Amino acid sequence: MNRKSWAELTDPQLLAQCAVDTYRASGPGGQKRNKTSSAVRLRHTPSGLLVIAEESRSQHENKAKALVRLRQALYLELREPVPEPARCPGGLADHPDWQAAHQNQRIVIRGVKDPRFWPAVGLVLDVLVVAQSRVSDAAEWLGVTTGQLIDFLQLDEKVWQQANQIRARFGQKPLR
């Protein structure tokens, strides 16, 4: 399976692929905080990703938050191959994850709550890896301007950090 098929699983299906740990979280939260095991740690066995949610006193709420974080982590941290630019002369305009995010050479996603955001993030980070973190090459290949691509990466702090980690891997300076 790939990251998209994992991310599209229902909550029970995705949980079935995870080792679930509950524990008592430290910190503020009143008398009940240290008496109940409400914090949740999910380890996605197929990918090895680990996410934690411990802000609520409700184990159910924390489990739901951890599942959301796991889906985001799948797109943030797992890279998938994309065709080299030479083999894909028209760019990636027809890629399903990018088609929904991009129209008339503009990125139409305006925030992380848009359901198209995380699949588009996965593709953009994949393209950055293939482009050896050269943002201008990645933007050209995706059919947008460099400024539009940088604005898209800045929509979420974790996406920005991941893009800069990719740049560091290729010896490039961080984006500002």
Image: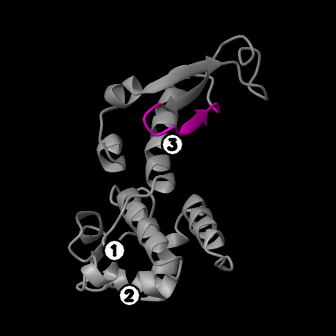
Task: Name the secondary structure under disc 2.
Answer: helix
**Residue type for callout 2:** Glu
Q: Label 3 to label 1, Cα distance in Å? A: 23 Å
Give the residue number, with chain letter if any, for mark 2: 140
Crowding at mark 3 (Cα within 10 Å: few <14, some 14-19, many 20+): some
Q: Which part of the image, by quadrant, shows the N terminus? A: top left
**Camera-nearest residue between 107 and 78:** 78
| Disc on the earlier residue, 3 or 1 | 3
Give the residue number, with chain letter if any, for mark 1: 108
Is residue 54 in the magenta section? yes
| Residue at 35% across, 44% down | 7
Give the residue number, with chain letter if any, for mark 3: 69
Please provide percent x and percent y for residue 54. 64, 30
Q: Which coloring applies here? A: one colour
Q: For this view, does 33 lie left or right of residue 17?
A: right
**Residue type for callout 3:** Arg
Q: For this view, does 147 lie left or right of residue 3?
A: right
| Residue segment shown in magenta | 45-55
Give the mark toward the camera: 2 or 1.
Answer: 2
**Camera-nearest residue between 29 and 132:** 132
> Does 3 sit above or below residue 153?
above
Please provide percent x and percent y for residue 68. 46, 41
